[in-house]
Image (tube, grey):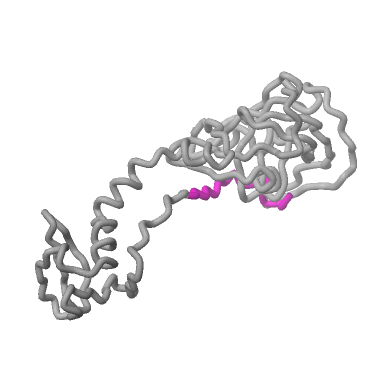
Amino acid sequence: MSPTALSRVRIAIAIAIALMPALSPGAGAQEDGGGYRTYTNAAGKTIRAKLVDKKGGIAHLRMVDGITYRVAVETLSQADREFVDSWEPTHAKEEKLRAVDMGELFAARGFKGVPLTLKNNQALLDISVGGQTFTCLLDTGAQGSVIDRGKAKELGLVVRENAGFAGGIGGSAGPVGMTNLANLKVGGVHKTGATFAVMDLRAVSGKQGSTRFDGIVGFDLLEELEAVIDYKGGVLYLREDPATTAADPG
């Protein structure tokens, strides 16, 4: 764990937005980066233009010089008709994306949503071990996850002492131990075999406007569970650890 993680409480939020596949043009379509495309009519004549609107069977084709032609879709080639039929204006695509339910998208990809508690510009979540729950600060800037020494003792965790010594800008954070949580739960997501550093977090927890917490969930655990953080929605999306058995560890 980086030394500064104990002297600063920071949250780096990464929001991953899963987008629906973009609508693809019809067969034979060749759009350039600006959306311009060669259209062909039944007589074989072609124009290079961009489709900007369609209404009542009429395609509005804007040329590079800015002139817009209104062309009956039925007079275009089969490939062009298919392209026009599949085309949607930008505002319609944006409305579809805004209507996407993030939870449903992530659930379809094997993720589970874990609610975050947002206080004092900090994100907190609950972790359960052996049926007992403790509150953790979500900190993607911390290389490793940590549990407070007092909380580890309260939970009856086995701690291997003298694993290191931590310090930061604010001074010494004291000796570091290590403990292995054989089974833990983050919301409804199970994790088998997570290693946490053990140290006194009283120097940062509840200090200088910080909310009280018993541990820190760092980058290591977030990476293992393929975390996606939706800060605005207050949800942490995690993928179930494939090594975890179906049994609920409590």
Report x, y in % for residue 193: 80, 37
The span picked out in magenta is 1-16
Q: Residue at x 55, y 42 (%)?
A: 109
Whether 120 is drawn above or below 224: the answer is above
Q: Residue at x 80, y 42 (%)?
A: 174
Report x, y in % for residue 25: 33, 63
Whether 201 is drawn above or below 66: the answer is above
Q: Is residue 8 magenta?
A: yes
Q: Quadrant of residue 84?
A: bottom left
Residue in front for this viewpoint, 108 or 205: 108
Residue in front for this viewpoint, 4 or 103: 103
Position of 67 with respect to 216 (left or right) is left
Question: Can I make out residue 170 in this image?
Answer: no
Q: Quadrant of residue 210?
A: top right
Question: Can I make out residue 195 in this image?
Answer: yes
Rendered-image quadrant of the C terminus: top right
Residue in front for this viewpoint, 1 or 34: 34
Position of 154 with respect to 210 (left or right) is right
